[in-house]
Amino acid sequence: MIRVLHIMGSLERAGIESFVMNLYRNIDRNKIQFDFAIYNEPTANGYADEVKKLGGKVFVVPTKEKSIIKCFSTIRGIVKDNAYSVVWRHTSSCIGGMDLYAAYFGGAKTRVLHSHSSRRFGLEKYLHYLLRPLCRIVSTKKLACGKVAGRWMFGTTKYEIIPNGVDTGKLEFNASIREKYRTEFDIKDEIIIGNVGRFEKVKNHTFMIDVFKEYSNKIGNAILMLVGDGSLEEECREKVKTLGIADKVLFLGNRSDVSNLLQMMDVFFMPSRYEGFPVSLLEAQATGLSCVVSSEVSRETNVTGNVSYMKLSEPHLLWCKALREAAQKRDKDGCKKVRDEGYDISDIASRIERMLEII
């Protein structure tokens, strides 16, 4: 059996984590087993318990902010003590990619660097470019969720694209689930504008709230549904109270039933400041939702042809009109289109199995 150590930020219900867990559930665990080294202590709402039920181990690593030396020595020790030959680092920048040096000194022969984002800002951006040549050297396998994420991490160096696959079997549009959930939430004919994502600056929740405020004023009869949690959640809760729209905004936190919540929605809203290839956007398309996203999101994410891109500098009213128009359309063939384009997780799991068996 091949045991693979995945290094990532957490095991919470976020984009990268959801992709890796979808992969874990669908891979042949008689041949390949996943273990995880994470930087944040696992919580009851995350995936840690499921990992253990599936036979995986979870290690917690000190953050680089606390101690670079302890971070390095802990990862090296985990790799060495458990004799991992394959270590797979999922990251948004080359700062995370430096963990592969610890894996190298721990004895890992195969060191996978997997890019999941397309941009960073401030000091992290400059550190990323400074460290990029070192990450190219230490990684023996270079992967990206898409072309933009690949260029960000590897520049002109050769890499392979592994799409962020989703479980289309759980995402097929289901009118009965839609009706059941809308009844449970006591939602009748209101338009549900939805987003799934952590409350962090990159996701641009304050922009969502401002646009929704204008939507409520100019168009009305709508609810903003926000799924996820994060460091800016409380700030956003205060903002909707200040704007007087608290009764129209649902904060649902981390949920294990995201596929059913997507059935409830009428349009998916993602005005992110940047993205790699977000899993939630792919899931939304699979359920047949039309999506209104920022032009900072890569065009390659438009898998079904139902994604509209808008500049963040556009007036809020234009965003409102785009949301209203998109909410009128539901593509019942969304799942088929996602499968046909090669984004079903079972196909990607088979591809990963073949890759791991030969490296």
Image (cartoon, grey):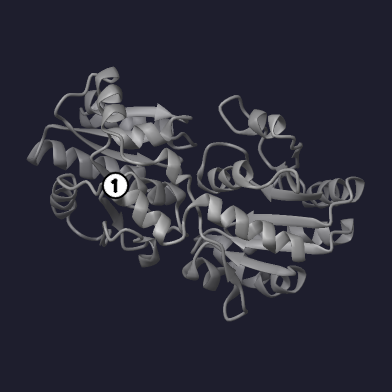
Q: Is residue 20 toward the left or the right of residue 269 in the image? A: right
Q: Is residue 115 toward the left or the right of residue 218 in the image? A: right
Kindly identify the amino acid type of the residue bearing the numbered disc 1.
Gly
Residue 45 to residue 68: above or below = above
Residue 218 to residue 93: above or below = above
The one nearer the camera, 142 or 316, is: 142
Residue 76 visible from this viewpoint: yes
Helix, strand or loop at mark 1:
loop
The one nearer the camera, 339 or 274, is: 339
The C terminus: image quadrant: bottom right
The mark total stands at: 1
Residue 45 position within the rendered picture, expressed as x and y whole percent measured from the top left: 56, 27
The one nearer the camera, 1 or 249, is: 1
Residue for badge 1? 288
Q: For the view shown, which residue lies furthest in the bottom direction? A: 156
Residue at the spot 17% in from the left edge and 53% down from the top edge: 322
Residue 77 position within the rendered picture, expressed as x and y whole percent measured from the top left: 88, 47
Residue at the spot 77% in from the left edge and 47% down from the top edge: 67
Residue at the spot 62% in from the left edge and 38% down from the top edge: 11
Residue 199 visible from this viewpoint: no
Residue at the spot 17% in from the left edge and 56% down from the top edge: 315
Give the crowd class for mark 1: few <14, some 14-19, many >=20 residues within 10 Å. many
Residue 145 position within the rendered picture, expressed as x and y whole percent measured from the top left: 53, 61
Q: For the view shown, which residue lies furthest in the right direction? A: 81
Q: Is residue 232 toward the left or the right of residue 103 in the image? A: left
Q: Is residue 245 toward the left or the right of residue 230 in the image? A: left
Residue 90 position within the rendered picture, expressed as x and y whole percent measured from the top left: 63, 55
